[in-house]
Image (cartoon, rainbow, N blue to C red):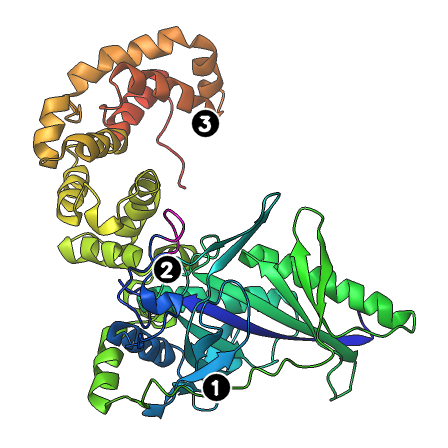
Amino acid sequence: MTDYTTVIGLEVHVQLSTHSKLFSPAPSGALGEPNTRVHAIDLGLPGVLPRPNAAAIELAVRAALALDGDVQTVSRFARKNYFYPDLPKGYQISQFEEPVCRGGSVPLGDGRSCRLTRVHIEEDAGKLTHGDIGTLVDLNRAGMPLVEIVGEPDLRTPADAHAFLHNLREILRYAGVSDCDMELGSMRCDANISLMPVGSTRFGTKVELKNLNSLKMVQRALEYEERRQAAILAAGGRIAAETRGWNDEAGESRPQRSKESAPDYRYFPDPDLPPLVIAPAMIDRQREALGELPQHRRARYRTDFQLPEHDILVLTQERAVGDWFEALVAAGIEPKTASNWTMSEVLPAQRQRTTPLAEFPVSPQQLCELVQLQGRGALTQVSARKVFQHLLVHGGAAEAAMHELGLLRIVDRDVLQPLVDAAIAALPEAAVAVRAGKERAMDAIKGNVMRATQGRADPAIVDALLRAALGIGSAPPA
């Protein structure tokens, strides 16, 4: 690959999170029984007129603002004419010469970004399923509201394409524009790739890749296509301008259709829809609704909370996670402690649930009470986790759960001394090793005491009693 420069451009369709379709009152959502979420407008029946969904327009404007694009106060819908079984009207309502947004960018990391050509609104087509009995048409998806995000050919590696999609998805999720689930089709990507000799400014012949259903799949497909084109060019061959489908099981792209001549979609302004006029007040409302984007939140966590980079990345992958963490800090927990509990206990428990994090059974206030009990010495770390698991199931107050479970920390030396003596007697080899200077052998004896008390013994007191009984000094500095 040292002889060629890779040029990649992405076109991404994102389904907007609305309750109904773009031009009809049919409920949104492509899932469910086929052809059950369809309106006469989606079917293209005579005598029906499209009516734009105001919520979809607002989300499209919010997406444009999130991507730092230039929202156009006047744009137009156009008809993109082509005939296919999943398009009952024989045309798709889209935007062509006058999109809702021009420009914008998507960050790639390391201070780099990829420019955007445009963001425009359009309706989705239906879905075709090919099988032994023929081709089946499901129009549940027909008319779903989309924004198409068209990137400039600024990407130079498949890893750049992965970063583009990862960061785009993250931004749009933060903005509340879409769930961007590639597996369910609410975010779909077509990738254009070409190779040109190093030092050249003239792009090579472009190949379009389709059937890309995950971020990793996009990167794998582009890496394969990069190798395939380089091998053809190195052998003196010519790249065919074509659309290729990615077969992930075989790990290769396969020809679908030629692109030697561009299709004529005969775009023209939709006569049933007037120009889309967006008031400045609506743009201002969407800018306010946009809230804090991930890169800004990460910068704030570095400066305000002084968190390690790993914590910052985990806490800012989803807006809801950061919101929950910040609610815990606002309740009175030190940021690093709040981060530890969020990452080690809250998120693993949340992954077992289908409800959103906002409905997590333990509130930030309940967890704050639990952490404060541990901070005061009433609970050991092990016992605090047991109380947390109890709250997940039964709710209530942390202190009441602590007493109900009998988990109050044992700090009475008279109670712990017999248990320490019993642990030393039960593990004579470990005791000999400790006396010989092998500090790590102490853990086995401590573990014996902790098991005997079900994790309730104060670790510091156990350590002091053990050292006194074994006749060794205090613990070495960490």
Q: Is residue 313 rendered magenta in the image?
A: no
> x and y percent of residue 22 in the render?
33, 71
- The amino acid type of the residue labelled 1 equals Phe
Going from N to C along the chain, the mark reached first, 3 or 1, is 1
Q: Are marks 3 and 2 in contact (CB under 8 Å)?
A: no
Would residue 61 be seen by someone viewing this image from the given angle?
Answer: yes
Q: Residues within 10 Å of mark 1 (few under 14, many from 20)?
A: some
Give, as a three-letter code, the residue at label 3: Glu
For the residue marked with disc 2, what is the amino acid?
Answer: Asp
Mark pair 3, 1: CA separation: 73 Å
Judged by depth in the image, the label closer to the viewer, 1 or 2, is: 1
* Among the 4 quarters of the image, the one containing residue 19: bottom left
Q: What number of labels is visible?
A: 3
- Residue 355 appears left or right of 124: left
For the residue pair 309 and 50, the one nearer the viewer reads as 50
Q: Nearer the viewer, mark 3 or mark 1?
A: 1
Element type where label 3 sits in the image = helix
For the stretch drawn in magenta, the main secondary structure is loop
The quarter in which the N terminus is drawn is bottom right
Q: Earlier in the sequence, mark 3 or mark 2?
A: 2
Q: Is residue 471 at all visible to an observer of this figure?
A: no
Q: Secondary structure at mark 2?
A: loop
Badge number at residue 179: 2
Residue 96's disc is 1
- Image height check: is 190 above or below 364? below
Q: Position of residue 153 (x, y in %)?
A: 61, 80
Q: Nearer the viewer, residue 188 or 346?
A: 188
Q: Report the span colored magenta.
A: 30-35
Residue picked out by circle 3: 439
Q: Crowding near pointer 3: few (<14 within 10 Å), some, many (20+)?
A: few
